[in-house]
Amino acid sequence: MNEEYFRAKKMGDREIRRARSEGRDPYIAALDEIVPEADTLSHDRIGIQEIPLRMIAGTKTVARANAFARNFMPVMPARTEMAEKWANLYDAQIEEGIRDPIQVFEYMLHFYVQEGNKRVSVLKYLGVPSMEADITRIMPNPSEEPDYLMYKEFLEFYACVPIYDIVFTKPGSYRRFAAMVNQDLKHKWDRDFINVIRGAFFRFYSVFQRKGGNSLPITPGDAFLLYLQVYRFDSLLDRSKYDIEERLNEVWKEVLLESKDDKVELIKEPIEEKKNFILGSLYNENHPLKVLFVYGKDPKTDAWEAAHEKGRVEVEQYFGGKIKTAGMLAHPLKENPIRISEEVKNYDVVFTTRRELMTDTLRVALKYPNTRFFNCSIFLNYHSVTGYFGRMYEAMFLMGRLAAQNTKNHKVGYVANAPVLGRMSEINAFAIGAALVDPQIKVYLEWSGKKEGSWQEDFAKNDIKVYAGPNLEDEEDNQPVHGVRVITDTGVEKIAIPVWNWELYYEKILQMILDRNWDRAKSENGNTAMNCWWGMDTGVIDVDGMDGLDWTVRKDLNIWKRLMINNAWNPFEGELHSQNGMVQMDGIERLSSNLIISMDWLNHNIIGSIPTLSELNEDMRQLTMASGVKGTDDL
């Protein structure tokens, strides 16, 4: 008997013992047990093509399952017919290679062997990465389950790129990957280019596997996509495996973070531990903390950037000589694919002020780990870059109440620019605030970032006189939120606006760094991303213009403001209803912060919908691709 069979059997026996000790079924899975109705579902003949052995999950029938351990190693005794056939196949593979394709059923991106279990076992034992298979696809019943929706995305990808090598598990990943390689999912890709894609992926995968990536709860495809967010696709073609390994080492913390269920800790208020007077601060007038602000657009012409620039100037004045700041403009994407220069290495802290700069920020953060990097965004979770944003939905709840108190026809409008993370909470809080004043009110939602249509014309058609949004004359809308405006016969009157106190936000972050509280918290969090998500209780968000309101309106808003500041009430607690029905029942605690940020539904009294990527103009499409809510991808 071939000695290799005995070695393989030992591996199988060891896997059997381990599986039993963990309370798992020790044998390979059988599709007939997993999906009893498999034979009655729709079948599509795919044909013969190469498939990754790592995606072979089991066998088709129960009868053949007990011959192999979960790792597909044989467990039948020596001197049996099965053992002899296995040994003969091993010899055939060594001498000339196994050429006949196996027969498999594919169900939800897992393969189950109908004919060829021993060939799979031999090749897995030898560490062969792939083999040819004659594939029949079993189509699952349609549903709204996340796994099925991701499978639909895969099928869209497969129609253009008929390979099984690259599998993603996060919504929108196939479209993001296509965009990274300058392709779309509407046309079939060139066969030669597909081979280039496969070659690049295998170069990455060989390094990923060698680093132990297969033991992580993340697909090689997800890790591949994360790598491509930092390093260009063509770098996999002209770099040695050593260079790829060096780069993967740099991004490995982000790969480990991606594999975790609990990826981020939300810091909801500044960390204010007692100062360590023995150690003191690392920075002073003779050795100031060097801080760089990187703007995505020119602060001289962009209101969002102007607010951050004002914050930079004022925070430097506040700290005197303890910090030294500078501002620079990121390179335009069309002119330079590297938007943030290596000048960042000369600074202790770097703030990048737009979500769209997160990927560029991550690139330089991985290259210069001794610099602290912050990006003005939320839930774009990376270990190397801290997100910072505000609970602006608190102020927009007040804006909703104010709008409802000023309308006379049970109608108000709301203009948003793009459906990014956190935006639905602002829209819904506005709608909830309005509904608590007037249960009959309707909120007409418009998107200034859409390619077609005019929110001004839609408001006029629907007789909207009170709205939260930009000026009627504004051609562009670069602000995430707006105050309440009233359209009169003589023009547009601005009543009150939500404000960002960026100077205070930067002051508190930099104070944490000066006091060493930030570095300590980062160290204690280990391999977990950190996001600052501060609200009205910290002073970084407020409402401006309330002094000019009627005293009864001002009193009403101040009452609700104090309730939120004292954490005594939240717009997203208790009974909630979306356009599609009840979100949660009365008496339920408020939604978690994660659910508030990632909210992808609209309140019941909103007239409108969430746009998809294809409906947005190029700037807003890029913004949404960077941090869009679930459902913005076109399926």
Image (cartoon, grey):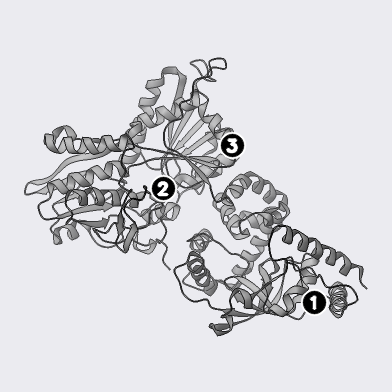
Answer with mark 2 or mark 3, whichever residue precedes in sequence: 3
Badge 2 density bin: few <14, some 14–19, many ≥20, Cα 10 Å: few
Identify residue type, mark 2.
Answer: Ser
If the image is split into quadrants, where does the C terminus sit? bottom left
Query: Is 151 placed left or right of 378 in the picture?
Result: right
Quadrant for residue 439, please give it.
bottom left
Image vertical order of residue 146 relative to residue 372, above or below: below
Q: Image point 63% across, 47% down: which residue? A: 252
Q: Which residue is mark 3?
A: 368
Badge 3 density bin: few <14, some 14–19, many ≥20, Cα 10 Å: some
Q: Which residue is mark 1?
A: 98
> Extreme right residue here?
1
Q: Which mark is residue 191?
A: none
Q: Nearer the viewer, residue 176 or 483?
A: 483
Query: Which secondary structure lies at badge 1?
Result: loop
Q: Image point 59% across, 68% down: which residue? A: 193
Give the foreground label among 1 and 2: 2
Image vertical order of residue 206 relative to residue 589, above or below: below
Quadrant for residue 600, please give it.
bottom left
If the image is split into quadrants, where does the N terminus sit? bottom right
Identify residue type, mark 1.
Answer: Ile
Does the image show residue 218? yes
Q: Position of residue 115 (x, y in %)?
A: 72, 81
Q: Position of residue 568 (x, y in %)?
A: 31, 38
Q: Nearer the viewer, residue 316 or 536?
A: 536
Q: Which residue is mark 2?
A: 592
